[in-house]
Amino acid sequence: MKHLIPNSRSWLPLACLTVLPLLSQAQTADKKTSIGLNVSALQYKGNYGSDYWDFSRNRYAPGLAINHYLGKGLDANLQAFYGELKGSRSANTFFATNIVNVNLGLKFKLNNGWALKEDAFIQPYLLAAPGWTYTSREGQFNGTRIDQDKSYFDLFAAAGINFRLGETVGLFVQTGQHAPYYANFDGDQTRDDNGWDDRFLQHTVGLTFNLGQAKDEDNDGVPDRKDKCPGTPAGVAVDANGCPLDRDKDGVPDYQDQCPDEAGKAELQGCPDKDNDGVADKDDACPDTPGKKELQGCPDADNDGVIDQNDKCPGTPAGVQVDANGCPLDRDGDGVPDYQDRCPDRPGPASNRGCPEIKAEAKKRLQEATKYINFEFDRAVLLPSSYPTLDAIVQILNEYPDYTLSIAGHTDSKGSDPYNLRLSHDRAAAARVYMLSKGIPDARIEARGYGETKPIADNATDAGRALNRRVDFDLYLTGDPNTAEVKYGPEPTMPDIVIPTTPVKKAPAKKAPARKAPVRKAAPRR
């Protein structure tokens, strides 16, 4: 914490000669405001003891205040200061607390016209000013740090005397006590229940300069004692009572009235509004129909930003982007508006939700692909004969970027159910991994395994089992339900069985290439 208050008892008399004053009080109704600076001596009282009236232990604080004349005997007073309080019991028990204090209250003057004249040389007063105290404390208590920043409600009462040196200048002295509620300047945690353990005296001295205009504060040519509208801006024409002119008698003075010859509303700077939509008639493109301010007072029933009279597509759903005619955008021009178009950048029929339909040739390739996807016996390892078919499917995926590919693996009934389920899943996954390696995004291919649960032929025959050992490929619009799940239901839970996914030896595959053809034609395999 940086302490900015000098610790010198010689500062107080010097400040009396050099510092501009606190505004103590205005002298008359003609000089309503005083302003200035002051210097104060602060004296602490708390758990460390009392420095009250011990001027050898003063802590000095500069201050600022503003005073305003309210009436005979009464002023409003605002004052603020920055200071510091210090105390010490030992080398490891001490505190130094910076204080920022602001108070706003009332000053009760004895020079009120009946006790003393308002322009008396000696002008005693009492001050009651609640306020706010902010403290920033550093120090130790029995060797423990007690640093803390905190604010408090402050009660301040003071008595003082202002010496009237002239119409504008005064010298004043003042003494008062600050009692911030539950304040803890010294960091001692032993507290009373009344909340007033720590407080301080403030002895203040300064000069005052009274400001104000006599007779005609607003310079409108009407004396203040006759002016029924004080504070009129400079240059504004006024009537005999000092009030701004109002030709149309709508309560809005001409200098603020944008329509001074037509009676209007104060919130519209004195202009009329026939349709009561909050837009002045002079700015309203639809003055006879209530509308929106942002649309120059014209209505927009569907809130699409296009006024009703120009809207060729009324009733557009909320939040839908529209063109200048108020119609929903259709970027690809396929007749399906973007907000309903699943493929807004590629044209397609409304029957397919605005997406391109898959050509018959592509559908046929997908249907026949299952015949040419082959794996090593009882393994999830693709045979090279499968690559051309998978490459063709990759081309289809690139041609239809709005679609997702479903891969579903199946087996015959030989072997255990858990083993078949895992084998079917891993074979579908092997086909997926191959196509991902060709640049297809991961999210566009889903692989599932159904084992022997979804046969398409009789598992009692070799021919039937060959048909059941298959991998299905289906395209569906991204975001729609997975085709395999629609056809076969959810994928069964995968068992904890490891299916070999890499060949043990590469040599056998090279020694008998002629044997691959029977595999592609559904020769016996697992």
Image (cartoon, grey):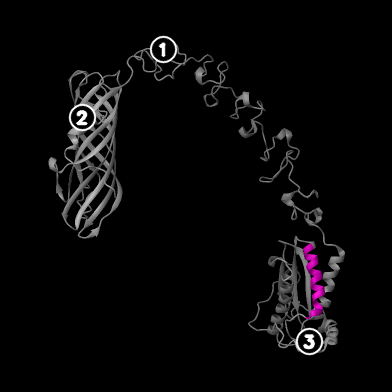
Q: CA distance from mark 3 to mark 2?
A: 109 Å
Q: Which residues are magenta?
A: 383-398
Looking at numbered disc 1 in the image, what kind of residue is underneath it? Asn
Which disc number belongs to residue 344? Answer: none
Question: Does the image show residue 25?
Answer: no
Looking at numbered disc 3 in the image, what kind of residue is underneath it? Ala
Q: Which residue is tagged 2?
A: 17
- Name the one closer to the observer, 457 or 229: 229
In the figure, 208 relative to 396: above or below?
above
* In front: label 3 or label 2: 2
Q: CA distance from mark 2 to mark 1?
A: 45 Å
Whichever of labels 3 and 2 marks the residue nearer the N terminus, that label is: 2
- Name the one closer to the observer, 216 or 91: 91
- Where is residue 293 drawn, in percent x and y? 61, 32
Q: Is residue 484 magenta?
A: no
Q: CA distance from mark 1 to mark 3?
A: 113 Å
Q: Which residue is tagged 3?
A: 509
In the figure, 104 relative to 217: above or below?
below
Q: Which residue is tagged 1?
A: 241
196 horizontally vs 305: left or right = left
